[in-house]
Amino acid sequence: MPPCRHRCEGSMTPPASPPRLGLRGVLLCFCILAALLPALLLLPVAAGIGSRITESTTAEGVRTTGRLVASNLARGLFQQWREVEGLAGFVGAGGSHEALRQRLETVKSLNPQYAWLGLAAPDGRVQVATDGVLEAQSIGSRPWFKAGLQGPFAGDVHEAVLLQRILAPSAAEPMRLVDFAAPVRRADGVIAGVVGSHLNWDWVRELLLGTPLERGTDVLLVARDGRVLVGPSDLQGRELNLPSLLAARQSTAITTTETWPDGGRYFTAVVPTIGYRDLPGFGWSLIVRQPEAAAVAGARGMMSTLFSSLAATAALIIISGLMLAGYLSRPLRTLTAGAVALADGTPHGPLPDERRYREVAELSDAIARLHSRMTQRPAAVAPPARVAVPTSADNGSGDAA
């Protein structure tokens, strides 16, 4: 019975060991993890940081654009104000009407944006004017004249009342003007009249819109009452109930993101006042808006570039890891095959000699020494010949012979 047990145990097949990764596979897996894990961890963080940077940069860009456009508009209007201020000083210093007339005509010929310039007496009657327009007529009821008696004045855009019939009676659209007025003071401080000028509104619009803008960026000029004077055609002339418009009416500078009537979201910046030096205020505010989608597109482009860079870096790490794994594992596979053949007693040819790196060289030398000892072991000594010892029977038979 025991022999059967031993026979059965000897016939049992040992359980197969689970497959294991080789050195090359381990190194390759490590390199793949080293390449992908940082990218997977960094991408969400980079996306959040990129989004915040994009929003901050876009908001600052919108603010800067608003300040630039407002500054260009204010400087252009300031030049026209200086002309009116200089004319008032000329008259106050005792300049004659004839000399004033020549000067008015010269200013108008050099600056076609002026529709009219003139001097009115304190009673409102026009004394001198370009091309003689409105001379000897009373303009005492006009807002710019009344305000000019009190001090420097800048009037909001309005339709021409008196000049339309004279200067452009057949125009398809009404003439629109903005006003400047300055009091004329004599040496003793007494007001001797008011110098006034009317600027064509189209010139102001061109001055406002002449600043180069990024694609999709809109500039809106808003009146004191919140009405859009210049802007996209669907907004012009409207009063909008938006935080930016409310801030503009309250002369508050803000930068925000808000939804406009067209349903789009915009980065919006408000420049509450348009002024330069002693330029009288028109009560205008400037609003600059840029579509949020444009900023998001910029962030997406940045993320795409970052993703491409990370992907290229990951691919480079994996390829380098694959090459390193091959470099390290190839001599080990060769030595392993030689060692297995040596252990099985079936070596074919000389054992491999690998010198690629130190550990492999030491292992190769150790296998070579083991092989040398196995081949130099002395052969087993044969047992001595057996000698026959004679017995008594043998002796007797010999004697008889």
Image (cartoon, grey):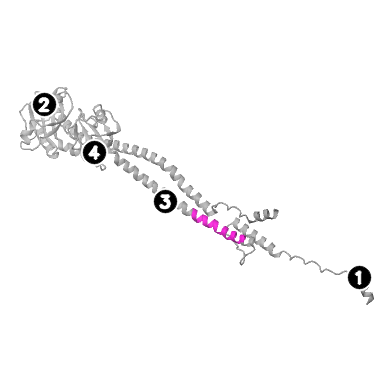
- Which quarter of the picture shows residue 279? top left
Total labels drawn: 4
Residue 218: which disc? 4
Q: Residue drawn 70% across and 53% down?
A: 2
Mark 2 or 3, nearer chain start:
2
| Disc 2 from disc 3: Cα separation | 72 Å
The residue carrying pointer 2 sits among few (fewer than 14), some (14 to 19) or many (20 or more) residues within 10 Å by Cα, namely: few
Between disc 3 and disc 4, the foreground one is 3
> Quadrant location of the C terminus?
bottom right
Q: Is residue 331 magenta?
A: yes
Hey, which residue is sitting farthest bottom in the picture? 401
Q: Amino acid at mark 3?
A: Ala
Q: Which residue is mark 2?
A: 142
Q: Which residue is mark 1?
A: 393
Residue 113 visible to the viewer = yes
| Disc 3 from disc 1: Cα separation | 102 Å
Between disc 3 and disc 1, the foreground one is 1
Mark 3 or 1, nearer chain start:
3
Establish if 257 lies above or below 370. above
- Which quarter of the picture shows residue 337? bottom right
The residue carrying pointer 3 sits among few (fewer than 14), some (14 to 19) or many (20 or more) residues within 10 Å by Cα, namely: few
The residue carrying pointer 4 sits among few (fewer than 14), some (14 to 19) or many (20 or more) residues within 10 Å by Cα, namely: many
Q: Amino acid at mark 1?
A: Ala
The residue carrying pointer 1 sits among few (fewer than 14), some (14 to 19) or many (20 or more) residues within 10 Å by Cα, namely: few
**Viewer-proximal residue, 175 or 44?**
44
Q: Residue drawn 25% across and 40% down?
A: 217
Residue 212, given in percent of the width and then of the height, sits at: 24, 42
Mark 3 touches mark 1? (CB < 8 Å): no
Span of residues in magenta: 321-340
**Viewer-proximal residue, 174 or 366?**
366
Secondary structure of the residue carrying numbered label 3: helix
Q: Is residue 13 magenta?
A: no
